[in-house]
Amino acid sequence: MNEQCGNLRIAGCSFSVHPMSDQFIEHILESLEHVDTSKVWMETDDVTTTVRGRIEHVFDVTKAILLTIADRGVHVAFQGTYSIGCPGDSSGDAFMTESRERMNELNSISIDQKIAAKFSLYPMGGGDYMDTIYSQIERMEANGVDVSRAHYSTRLDGDTHSIFTGLEDVFRETEKSGSSHTVMTVTVSANSPSNKEDAS
Ligand SMILES: Cc1ncc(C[n+]2csc(CCO)c2C)c(N)n1
C-alpha cells in the first residue's frame, strides 16, 4: 500500500560508475538494467545517472548498482553527489508517494564487499555547519566504520553496508538538524589492486 508523504522533500543522487575493465559498457548498462529502479525517477546520459525520490530508495538503488558491478570482481570507482532540499519537478515528485520498502536490499545484503570511500558533507542554509559536520563524522564511527581524516573529506574503510547505512544516517540527520539544502559527495573504490590488505 502506498503512503502519502506530502511533507517529505525529494532527495536525489547524480552518480557515475567507472569499471576498470574492457567490458565497462556491459558492466554499466547491465547494472542499471539489473537493479530495481521502479521506486525512483531515473535518467542516464553519457556522463551520469540521476535518481530521485525518497531518501531510502536513492541510497538503495545507488548501493545496489555499485555492488552489482563490484560483485563481479572488477575494480570499480563510484562518484555520487547526493542532494536534498532542491525543489523537484513534478515528474520526480510523483515518486515521493512510493512505500518505504527497499526493492534491492534482499539482493544487496547477500553481497559481502569491502570498500574504501571518502565523503564530504555540505549542510547549507542553517546553523553552525562545522558543528553539524563534526557530529556527523562521530556518528559514522558508531556504525562500525573505520573513519580517518583526509583533506577536504573524511575517509571511510569497511563493509559496503555499514558505510552506506552510515552515509544515509548522516544525510538524514543533517537534514533533520535544520539544513535547508544538504549536499553530500561520495567517492568509492572497490576491488582496487592497490588495496593495502590485498597488496603484498
Ligand atoms: C551510473 C552511470 N551512469 C552513466 C554513466 C555514463 N556512461 C559512461 S559509459 C556508459 C555506457 C555506454 O554509453 C555510460 C552510460 C556512467 N559511467 N555511470
Image (spheres, rainbow, N blue to C red):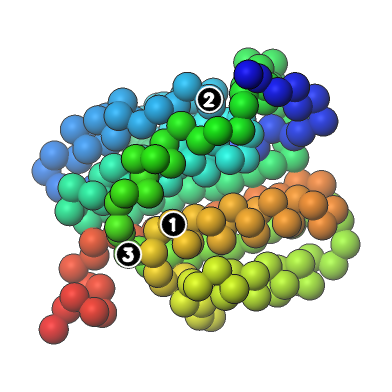
Image position, residue 125 (x, y; %): 84, 52
Instruction: Say few, some or many: other residues with alpha carbon within 10 Å of mark 1 (under 14 / 14 to 19 / 20 or more).
Output: many
In this view, which residue lies farthest toward the bottom? 200
Q: In which quarter of the image is the C terminus?
A: bottom left
For image coordinates 57% across by 75% down, the residue present is 141
Give the number of the disc on residue 114.
3
| Identity, as a three-letter code, of the amino acid under mark 2 | Lys
Circle 1 residue: 161
Percent x, y of residue 79 = 43, 51
* Disc 3: CA contacts within 10 A as few (<14), some (14-19) or many (>=20): some
Tell me which residue sits at (80%, 25%) in the image: 6
Residue type highlighted by circle 1: His
Q: In which quarter of the image is the N terminus?
A: top right
| Left or right relative to 91: residue 57 | left
Q: Is residue 59 at least partly visible in the picture?
A: yes
| Residue drawn 69% across the image and 32% down it | 10
Dots 1, 2 in contact, CB < 8 A: no
Instruction: Kindly indicate the quadrant of the structure image that contains residue 30.
Output: top left
> Compared with residue 32, is residue 126 higher up or lower down, i.e. above or below?
below
Whether residue 92 appears in this view of the structure is no
**Kind of residue at disc 3:** Lys
Q: Is residue 12 left or right of residue 106?
A: right
Q: Is mark 1 within 8 Å of ligand 1?
A: no
- Dot 3 or dot 1, earlier in sequence: 3
Mark 2, residue position: 39
Residue 142 percent across, percent down from the top left: 59, 73
